[in-house]
Image: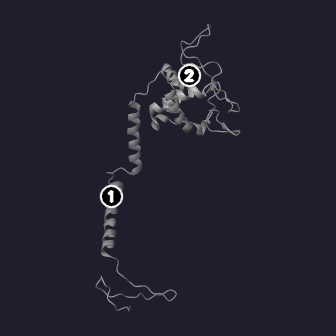
Amino acid sequence: MTDTDQNAGGGYADELRDHQFDGIQEFDNHLPNWWLWTFYGACIFSLFYWLHFHVVGSGALPLAQYEQEKQEWDEKLAQLDTAVSADELVAMSKDPEVVAAGAVTWLTCAGCHAQDGGARIAGADLPGVNLTDDAWLHGGRPEQIYQTVLNGVDGTAMQAFVKTIGARKVQEVVAYMLAKVKGTNVEGGKPPQGVPEEPAPGDAGAGGEQAPGTAPSGSGN
């Protein structure tokens, strides 16, 4: 093909550009009209996009949209009925189906607390606390554990799991903890952190009788 041949679909003559590289020359072909109009359209769109989001401010940027949606979601979560009593949690811990469901969710917790709850694997400490000893940072009664898992602890790695798994799964995993983790005092666990569990109001006095929903002496974190 010569530089005077007609382009089969364009109606214009192919022209070779003056430069060459390694004996190779290239044609100075026109870009397809559909490509050019797509490019022109993108330029026009970008102008209106810039005016809308960055000059007039009539549109919310992605980060602002995320913050707004997050606030709306947090408000919806706050309206959910997440209340549950210590007695209800203890009753759940005696229900095999609830405990089995909690065991599945516990796999998420095991990343920080280990599968056995001791927060240590092969001698290495994990980020979480030992949940099997008798020391607690935020209370060891069933309702206190539930609130810790549900709402998290500000300034720590303990997130509010109600936002990710919902209140029902939090109840199930707390039931699993009460049934299978708390009070097991696993060997080789992470050293205790916090203070011994305080008895719930109205718990047994000198008679030694234990109120429902409380752990025996020496129970877990």
Name the residue: 54% across, 33% down. 103
Which residue is under mark 2?
141
- Graded by Cα atoms within 10 Å as few (under 14), some (14 to 19) or many (20 or more), the crowding at tag 1 reads some
x, y percent for residue 152: 52, 33
Query: Which type of secondary structure does the marked residue at label 2 adopt?
Result: loop
Where's the N terminus, which quadrant? bottom left
Residue 97 appears in the picture as rendered: yes
Which residue is under mark 1?
51
The image quadrant that residue 198 belongs to is top right
Name the residue: 65% across, 21% down. 218
Left or right: 188 as drawn, with respect to 220: right
**Front-lying residue, 217 or 147:** 217
Name the residue: 36% across, 82% down. 29
Left or right: 136 as drawn, with respect to 100: right
Name the residue: 46% across, 34% down. 162
x, y percent for residue 112: 60, 38
Residue 138 appears in the picture as rendered: no
x, y percent for residue 48: 31, 60
Residue sitting at the far left: 11
Query: Which type of secondary structure does the marked residue at label 1 adopt?
Result: helix
What colouring style does the render use?
Answer: one colour
x, y percent for residue 158: 55, 36
Cα separation, mark 2 vs mark 1, equals 57 Å
Left or right: 99 as drawn, with respect to 72: right
